[in-house]
Image (cartoon, grey):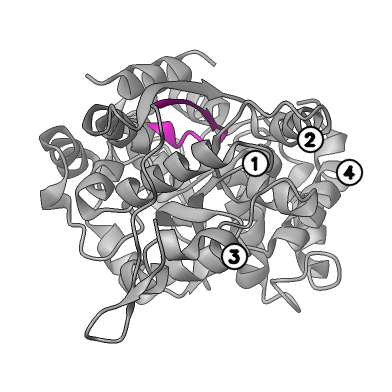
Amino acid sequence: MSHKGIDRRHLLKTSAGLAVLASSGMPVFAAPTKPSAPVALNIMDVAGNLALTQKAIENYRKAKPDWVSRITFTKSPAPELPGKIKAQQDANRVDIDLVLTGTDVLSAGLDQKLWIDLLGTQSANLPNLKEIFLEPAYRMQGLAQGQGVVVTYYPSGPLLEYMPDKVKTVPKTAEELLAWAKANKGKFMYARPANSGPGRTFIMGIPYLLGDKDPQDPVNGWDKTWAYLRELGENIDTYPAGTTPTMKALGEGTVDMIASTTGWDINPRVLGVVPKNAEIAALKNFRWVADAHYMCVPKGISAEKLNVVIDLMNFLLTKEQQAYTYDEGYFYPGPAVKGVTLEMAPAESQAAIKEFGRAAYADLIANNPIELPLMPDKMVLAFRKWDEEIGSRKSK
């Protein structure tokens, strides 16, 4: 098993020149310039993205020893990283060369102006993202405002995941979920949205379920949603700081139902953290709220390192390397690039998804709208409001 598989199992179980024109008239990116000597890269992951991309990144190191001498991988809780980067920038000593992040730290970094404008300064050295990305992944790319590049994508959720021996009558609507939570106090759980993909997908999906005024405006358009989350919260014992504890709670029987996503449904069952027979459900008026992981570069890194990072990005966006992002269903499906099929993925990925994937996902993805998450500035506001009005009522 690769290092990333071991790492995530442990985590879950323990708490180029100028662009030229092709004959079609479309721009062809030019490869970045080789550095004068191999550089060492420090890559920070705040989204669990290395589960999907570490093998491909290591492939890059092996393929380009004259570009990169060493790659160091580190991880950080999402809420802590923006402050750390800001402190390094203020001290003019940035030692993080690439950040792999979800929409949470992407948003915080945009808000605090931490990121290099990659599309504004490096577009000639990047592929035509509109050409290569799946349509929803390209819409997710727009959220980055040019200051990040999508590396993985999935439709996400919100889904309910439950144990069928404990939940005999599965809620079909948001109202029925609230009634179920009232009748089964402490048995439903979701994690703090600022540090949980399923947590934030859940709260961003509620406005669609309730027909709220403006699902993209958490301050002025979520009146029904905030009222609902407050009432639901009266029947929730605690909001864990991240997603993994919710999976452990479901697997151990502490709770019977949690907020989930496609990847968080499949992968913990692959790893044995959640029983294989756990089931999923989507509520009436369900719409997918998409999610993605981004490659962002902090302001302050050297020009030479930036050149290598851009080259690495190009490598990770090839179909061959994108196929690794199927992983063991962690961000299912995973690839952001068109034309990357499961048959292209490693054998272990194919086997895991064949055994633990769900036939229902193909229909759910094909026949339900895929919405964008909140714009970055709105997401920051939603996290703050949730922390102040919902999360503060419970111990973490």
Residue extent of the magenta highlight: 38-50
Q: What's the residue type where badge 4 is placed?
A: Glu
Helix, strand or loop under label 3: helix
Residue at position x 36%, y 58% in the image? 336
Residue 86's label in the rendered image is 2
**Residue in the foreground of this view, choosing between 104 and 163:** 104
Q: In this view, does 75 lie to the left or right of 70?
A: right
Determine which residue is flagged by label 3: 120
Q: Which of marks 4 and 1 is nearer the N terminus?
A: 1
Which of the 4 image quarters holds residue 346?
top left
> Few, some or many C-alpha atoms within 10 Å of disc 3 (few <14, some 14-19, many ≥20)?
few
Q: Is residue 49 magenta?
A: yes
Q: Is residue 309 above or below residue 29?
A: above
Helix, strand or loop under label 4: helix
> Few, some or many C-alpha atoms within 10 Å of disc 4 (few <14, some 14-19, many ≥20)?
few
Residues at discs 2 and 3 in contact (Cβ within 8 Å): no
Residues at discs 1 and 3 in contact (Cβ within 8 Å): no
Q: What's the residue type where badge 2 is placed?
A: Lys
Helix, strand or loop under label 2: helix
Q: State which mark lies toward you, 4 or 1.
A: 1
Determine which residue is flagged by label 4: 388
Mark 2–mark 4 distance (CA, rounded to whole Å): 24 Å
> Few, some or many C-alpha atoms within 10 Å of disc 2 (few <14, some 14-19, many ≥20)?
some
Determine which residue is flagged by label 1: 298
Q: What's the residue type where badge 3 is placed?
A: Gly
Residues at discs 3 and 4 in contact (Cβ within 8 Å): no
Helix, strand or loop under label 1: loop
Q: Position of residue 327 (x, y in %)?
A: 28, 38
